[in-house]
Structure formats: C-alpha cells, structure tokens
Amino acid sequence: MSAFPNENQQGEKLMMNTTRYFTKLLLVWLFIGIILSISKVYANNCVNCHKDPIFRTHNHKLYTYYQDWLTSPHQTAGLTCDQCHSGDPAAETVDAAHKGVHSTSDPRSTIFFKNLAETCGKCHEQVSGQFTKSKHYKSLMVYDNAPNCSTCHRAMNRKPYYHDIVDTTCRSCHNQQMLQSHAELAEEILRRLNITKGYLGWASLYYSSKDWPGTSKQEIQQINTEYHEILAKGHAFDLIDSDRTSAELLSKLRLIFEDAWKTCHTNKECEGIFK
Ligand code: HEC
Ligand code: HEC
Ligand code: HEC
Ligand code: HEC
Ligand code: HEC
C-alpha cells in the first residue's frame, strides 16, 4: 500500500528537495559573497583607478601624485590613498569613492594645511606631538604663515635632506628680516644628523654579521633610538635643544668608532670594518 506515495508524501519530498536545493544555492552564494567581499577589501579602487596610464596625458597632476606615492616609503609600508585622503576604497565609481575626498584648498579636506598635523599624526604621533608644541604650529593656526608637514615633506614622502630643505623651506621665510640665524643653525644640526645617520648605517650593516669591537649591539641600538627621538623632537623647533642633543650623540658615536679603530689595528678579527 505504501509503495506508492500519496500526495502528501510527494509534497513533503518535493518540499525537502526544494529546501535542500535552496540551502545549497544559499551556501554557494554565501561563498561567492565572501570571496567578493574579501577581494573588495584587498582590491583598493583608489589605486586601481589612479594607476591608469591615461592620466599621464589626460590629467598630469593625478599622474604625478600617483608616481610620487608609487616610489614612496609609504607605498612600501602598504599605505593606500584613502589612509591620508579618506574616501571609500571599496567603491567603484568616482563619485562614490570620492565621498569625503576634497581638494587641498578645502578646509574640510584631511590634507588642508591646517589639518595635516592631525592626519599625519594618526601614525606619526611622536613627531606630531612635538610639532603641535612649536611656534610654527601656533603661528600656522593663527596667521597661516608657518610651515606644515607638507611644506617640508611634500605630499608624503622623502626625508628632506639638509642642504635642500634649509634652502628651499627655512630660508624662504627666515630671511634677513626674520632671524636668518635660525636657518644657519638648522643647517649645522641637520649636517650633524646626516653624519650620525651615516655612522649608524655603517654600524648596523656591520652588526648583521658580527660583534663590534668594544661596543655591544644593544648600545648601538640604544643610540639608534636616541637618533630617532632627536629627529622627532626636532619638530618642536627648539633649536637650542636640538643643537645640544645632536652634538652629544655624534660625539658619542665618534668615540665608539675611534675605539674600534684602535682595537682593529691590533686585532685582525675585525678586519673589514674600516675598509
Ligand atoms: C574610477 C576611478 C577613480 C576612483 C575609484 C578614485 N578616483 Fe580619485 N580621481 C579620479 C579622477 C578621474 C580624478 C580627477 C577628476 C576629479 O577630481 O573628479 C580624481 C581626483 C582625485 C583627487 C584630486 C582631487 C582634487 O580636487 O584635485 C584625489 C585626492 C583623489 N582622486 C583621491 C582618491 C581616493 C583617496 C580614492 C579612493 C578612496 C579615489 N581617488 C578613487 C578617479 C578615481
Ligand atoms: C601619506 C599620506 C598620503 C598618501 C598615502 C597619499 N597622499 Fe595624496 N596627498 C597627500 C598630501 C599631504 C597632499 C597635499 C600636499 C601637496 O599639496 O603637495 C596630497 C595631494 C594629492 C593630490 C593633489 C590634490 C589637490 O587638491 O591638489 C592628489 C591628486 C593626490 N594626492 C593623489 C593621491 C593618490 C592617487 C594616492 C594613492 C595612490 C595618494 N594621493 C596617496 C598625502 C597623501
Ligand atoms: C596610516 C599611517 C600613516 C599616515 C597617515 C602617515 N604615515 Fe608617514 N609613515 C607611515 C609608515 C608605516 C612609514 C614607514 C615606516 C617608518 O619610517 O616609520 C612612514 C614613513 C614616513 C616618513 C619617513 C620616510 C623615510 O624616508 O623613512 C615620513 C617623512 C613620513 N612618513 C611623513 C608623513 C606625512 C607628512 C604624513 C601626512 C601627510 C604621513 N607620513 C602620514 C605611516 C603613516
Ligand atoms: C620645517 C620643516 C619640517 C616640518 C614642518 C615637518 N618636518 Fe618632519 N622632518 C623634517 C626634517 C628636517 C627631518 C629629518 C630628516 C633627516 O635628517 O633624515 C624630518 C623627519 C621626519 C620624519 C622621520 C623621523 C624618523 O625618525 O626617521 C617623520 C616621520 C616626519 N618628519 C614627519 C613629519 C610630520 C608628520 C610633520 C607634520 C606634523 C612634519 N614632519 C613636519 C622637517 C620638517
Ligand atoms: C612658511 C614660513 C616658514 C618656514 C618655511 C619656516 N619657518 Fe620657522 N618660523 C616661521 C614663523 C611664522 C615663526 C614664528 C615666529 C614667532 O611666532 O615668533 C617661526 C619660528 C621659528 C623658530 C623659533 C621657534 C621658537 O620657539 O622660538 C625657529 C627655531 C624656526 N622657525 C626654525 C625654522 C627652520 C629650521 C625652518 C626650516 C626647516 C623653518 N623655521 C621654516 C615661519 C617659517
């Protein structure tokens, strides 16, 4: 009797098959959805659209800024446009992506000159913290006449080098009338920091293979930390303080190198340091 299913049983079976079918379908769609949303997170549409080579001829400004990012330490560190400009990196159309993106001259923009200390300070807290203590920052907020992060670092990258930066930035404001001596002292401090950087580069290169004669790896690391602290503190533009700390650090390093030099003349093992 029950060999033939009745209408009710047939209906149930149909229901079960349909449910199973839709469950499978749902799972497939869920899977596709997850894949899509993951690829959306990773595909940054700011970069994807802005990298179009057509801008080279059609909008040279866009092309230049993209190239600037492409060769910057920020790009190497994985930063994308939206992290400084805001906007929606998952959106595909220009208008949707640009929600919140404004031009440099717009006070709402994250890159408006008065907002940069905050925008860059999200990641460079120590530097920004020092900068906001400076007379530069105060003057910038009240009179619009002092440098902000991009005056010296441009859009985003490149450590400014001393000979370049003093001539192209400091001297443009600190001329005869406005305490030229600031520019001269700044030049001297930056020259010292540059030599310090050279010594540190040398020492850390050496340390990747062996121990430095007479000085521990930790001591050199400590000096490296102090060096970066001096760079950050420099953004408070207390030149007297930077003058003292940069001179102390450099003479400490010079002593270490002199010691190593002496040791190396009597010790064959450290051949190769001073070549
Ligand atoms: C589909 C292409 C496309 C996408 C996606 C896109 N842009 Fe743009 N972007 C453009 C074009 C085209 C322009 C120039 C015309 C304009 O300003 O609308 C531009 C201009 C800009 C400018 C200059 C604005 C100005 O006023 O000069 C900035 C900054 C910018 N985009 C940042 C971003 C950021 C950040 C994102 C991602 C959140 C993004 N873009 C996503 C195409 C795109
Ligand atoms: C580390 C922060 C940072 C990142 C990352 C960044 N920018 Fe910028 N960008 C700036 C700053 C600051 C300025 C303004 C400085 C200036 O005027 O030169 C700027 C200016 C621009 C301008 C000119 C805007 C105007 O109003 O004239 C464009 C276009 C632009 N950026 C595009 C991009 C694109 C495209 C990317 C990603 C490929 C990107 N930027 C990544 C900080 C950044
Ligand atoms: C989302 C985080 C983030 C933001 C926002 C950001 N930076 Fe950076 N910045 C980094 C990282 C990460 C590095 C690379 C590691 C390092 O040197 O600290 C870096 C490196 C730098 C360097 C050193 C470059 C070098 O040659 O070593 C400078 C200068 C710099 N940033 C300036 C800025 C300025 C100016 C702004 C604002 C316009 C800014 N950054 C915004 C994360 C950020
Ligand atoms: C008046 C010029 C000037 C201004 C304004 C300025 N900087 Fe600098 N910045 C420098 C100089 C000079 C150095 C040191 C470069 C060197 O010797 O390698 C530096 C170094 C840095 C470094 C690298 C620090 C390290 O430890 O390697 C970062 C990051 C940085 N600045 C971010 C910023 C940010 C963010 C702002 C805005 C809040 C800013 N700077 C404003 C001139 C400036
Ligand atoms: C856009 C113009 C401008 C640029 C560029 C500029 N400054 Fe200044 N600077 C000012 C202004 C404005 C003041 C504030 C004067 C005041 O309030 O007494 C100032 C003040 C100073 C002070 C005095 C700070 C104090 O606490 O007494 C020093 C030091 C200084 N700047 C050094 C520099 C150095 C070094 C550079 C280059 C790396 C530089 N400035 C670039 C405009 C500028």
Image (cartoon, rainbow, N blue to C red):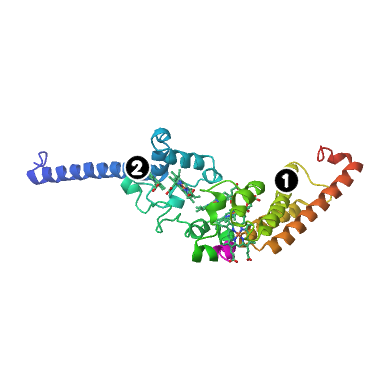
Q: Quadrant of the C terminus?
A: top right
Q: In terms of image quadrants, where is residue 176?
A: bottom right
Q: Residue sitting at 53 percent across and 48 percent down? A: 154
- Drawn side of residue 257 relative to residue 241, left or right: right
- Is residue 135 rendered magenta in the image? yes
Distance (Cα) linking label 2 and label 1: 47 Å
| Label ID, residue 198 | 1
Give the magenta-colored segment's residue range: 129-137
Count of marks, rendered view: 2
How crowded pointer 2 is (Cα within 10 Å; few <14, some 14-19, many 20+) is rated as few
Q: Position of residue 237 (x, y in %)?
A: 63, 61
184 or 118, which is in the foreground?
184
Residue 230 location in percent, x, y? 67, 58
Residue placed furthest toward the right: 266
Q: Is residue 200 above or below residue 179?
A: above
137 over 209 or under it: above or below: below
Q: Is residue 53 at all visible to an observer of this figure?
A: no
The three-letter code of the residue at mark 2 reads Leu
Residue at the spot of label 2: 36
- In the rendered image, the quadrant that contains the N terminus is top left
Residue 78 seen: yes
Local secondary structure at mark 1:
helix
20 left or right of 82 in image: left
